[in-house]
Amino acid sequence: MATVDLLFAALFNAAVLFLVTAGLQLIFGVQRIVNLTAGSLYALGAYFGASVFEWFSAQGGSPALLLPVLILSGLLAGQVGFVIERVLRTVYGRDEAFQLLMTFAFVLMFQDVLRYVWGAQPRLLGDLPSVYGTLAVGGFTFPVYNLLVMLSALVVAGLLYWLIERTSLGHVVRATAENGRMAEALGANTRRINTLVFVLGSMLGTVGGALVIPTTAASLEMPIALIVEAFAVVVIGGLGSIRGAFLGAIIVGVLRALSLTYFPELEVMSIYLVVIVVLVVRPYGLFGKAEA
Amino acid sequence: MKTTLAFLAVLAAFAAAPFALGPYYTTLIIPILAYAIALIGLNLLFGYGGLLSFGHAMFLAIGAYASAVMGAKLGVRSFEAQLIVAMLASGTVAGLIGLLCLRYTTIFFSMLTLAFGMIFHSFLFKFYDLTGGESGISVPRPSLFGASHAGLSKTAFLVGPFYWYALGLFAVMFLVMALVVASPFGLALKAARDNERKTAFLGVPVFWVRYVAFVLSGIYCAVGGAVLAVSIGAADPELSFWTQSGNMIFIIILGGLGQLFGPVVGAVSFTLLQDALMANTQYWRFALGAILALIIIFAPRGILGLITRALDWRRR
C-alpha cells in the first residue's frame, strides 16, 4: 500500500520538477546559460498563483477553475522573463562565468522582491485540491488535483517536443542552438529567438511554481532549495536535454520520496550521490552532449 | 616593486585599523581578513585558472568545523594544530574531489563543485553527533603559540592577540600566493585558462596544474574558515550552502578578478557595503544583486579595474 502512495507522491514531485527543469534545459540548450533564476521563477509562480487565485475567489470565481486559473497566472508571471533576458543580453558575448553570475545577481534581487511583495511569512492556499475530489482505483485513493498536474506535465512535455521537433519555429530554435552565427547568417532572427526561448523557459518555471501552490506553502526558502533539486535533475539528465529533464525528474522525484520515507537524514545526499555516480559513469549525463 | 609597496600599504592600513577604529569595528575586520585569506585561494582557481567553482563554501566550512571539532570535541586548543588539521582535511577532500571535478571545465565544473558542496552541506546538517546539526558547534577560544590569553575578555582577545595573529596569517598567505602566481606554475595556470590546447601542446600538464590550484584554493579557504569560525565563535552549516559560494565569487568579482589585490579589496568593500546597506534597508539583498549585475555589465575587472582605468586615463 505504502509503496503505491509513495510512488504517487514521487511522480507528483517529478511532474513539477520536470516543468521547472525543462525551462532550465531549454534555456541552456539554446543559449548555453545555466539559469540559476529558475528557482526564483518557481517561487514567483507560486506566490503569484496564490494571489491570483485568492483574488479570483474573492470575485466569486468558482473553485473548480483552480487548475486553469493557476496555469494562466503562471504563464502571466513568466513574462518577467522579458525583463531578465533584456538585462542578460548585455553579457551574451561574454565568458559564461559572468552569465552564470548574472543569473545569481537576479537570485539575490528576486529574494527581496518576493519579500517586499508577499512578506516573510509562508503563504498557503487552504485545502483546495479537495475541490477536485479523489479517485479510487483498486483500493487506493488518489487526489485528482495531483493527477491533473501530472497530466499537465505530460501535455507540456508533448507540446515542447512538438514545438521543437515538428514546427518551423522549432527548426530555427534548433539551428540557433547548434550554431547561432550560422543561423543568423541564414536569416534567423536569433535575437528574437533568444528572447522567445528565455521567456518560454521562464514560463515553464512559473507554471511549475503555480501548480504546486495548492499542495505546498510558498516561502522564501523555495528558490534556493529548488535549485538544489533542479540541478541534480539537470546533471543526471544531461545539460540542455529536455528528454534528460524528464527522466532526471522521475529519478530525483522517486529518490527523494524513497529517502524521505526510509532514510530522512540522507535526502539531499542520496540525490547528489546519484548525481556523482552518473557523472563518473556518463560524464555528460544520460542524454547530454559533450561540451562544444 | 609596485606590488611590494601596495602590499605594505595594505598591511599598514590593517595595522592602523584597531587604533583608529576602536574595538567594535576591529571585531568586524577579522572576518574581512578571514574572507580575504579564503578568497586569495579562490582567486587562484577562478581568476588565474578560469575555473568557476560554486562549491568552495565547502572548504570554508571544513576549516571552520576543523577548528570547532578540535577545540570543542577533542580539547585541542592550540590554534596552530587546528590550522594544520584544517589544511590537511581540506587538502585531502580537495584532492579527492578535484580528481573528479577537474575532468570538466566551464559550466560542468561549476555544477559538479556545486553538487559536492551540497553533499557536504547535507552531511553537516544531518550528522548531529559530529557536527551539531542545524545549530552547529560553538568554538572555544583557541590558544595562540601556546598562550591561552585566559585573562582577557572575549572582545579583548579578538581585537588584541587574535587580530594580530590573523593579520600575520593573512600577510604570510598573501606573500605565498604572490610567489605562486608569479612562478612558472602560475604562468602555466593562466596560459591554460587563455588557451588550453596551446598550453597542453607546449608540454604543460594542464590537468595537474589545475589540480594543484584546486587543492591550494581548498587549503586557503580552510584557513580562512578557521579564522572566521573563531571570530564568529561558531561553525554552522550555512557556511557551506551554495549561496555562500556565490557570495564568495561575488566578492572576488567586486574586488577585481584575477588580480592579486582583488580579494582584499573585495572583502573590505563587500563588508562595508553590506554593513551600510543593512543599516539602511531591510532589502539589502536586492541592492547587492543590483550592484553585482552593474559590476558584471560595466566593470568586469571590479573595483581594482576601475581604479587602474582611472589612473591610466589621468596619465594620458
Image (spheres, coloured by chain):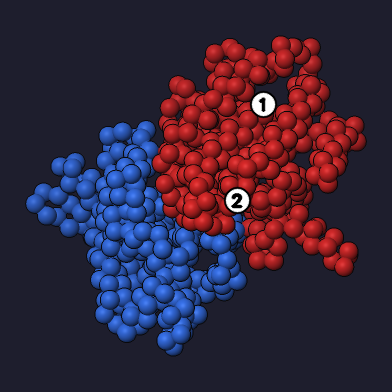
Chain colours: A blue, B red
Q: Quadrant of the C terminus of chain A?
A: bottom left
Going by the numbered disc 1, the residue's amino acid type is Val
Say which element carries label 1: helix
- Chain ID of residue with mark 1: B
Say which element carries label 2: helix
Q: Percent x, y for residue A75?
A: 42, 72
Going by the numbered disc 2, the residue's amino acid type is Lys
| x 49%, y 40%: residue | B208
Which mark is on residue B79?
A: none
Image quadrant in which you'd find residue B295 = bottom right
Q: Percent x, y for residue B18?
A: 86, 32
Q: Closer to the camera, A257 or B180?
A: B180
Q: Percent x, y for residue B219?
A: 58, 32
Q: CA distance from mark 2 to mark 1?
A: 34 Å
Q: Which residue is mark 1?
A: B230
- Residue at the far bottom in the pictured view: A187
Q: Where B72 falls versus A182 (above or below)? A: above
Which badge, 2 or 1, is on the more N-terminal residue?
2
> Horizontal placement of A95 versus A175: left or right?
right
Q: Closer to the camera, B187 or A255?
A: B187
Q: Percent x, y for residue B233?
A: 66, 26
Q: Closer to the camera, A290 or B136?
A: A290
Which mark is on residue B190?
A: 2
Q: Where A220 falls versus A184 (above or below)? A: above
Q: Is residue A5 visible?
A: yes
| x 65%, y 62%: residue | B296
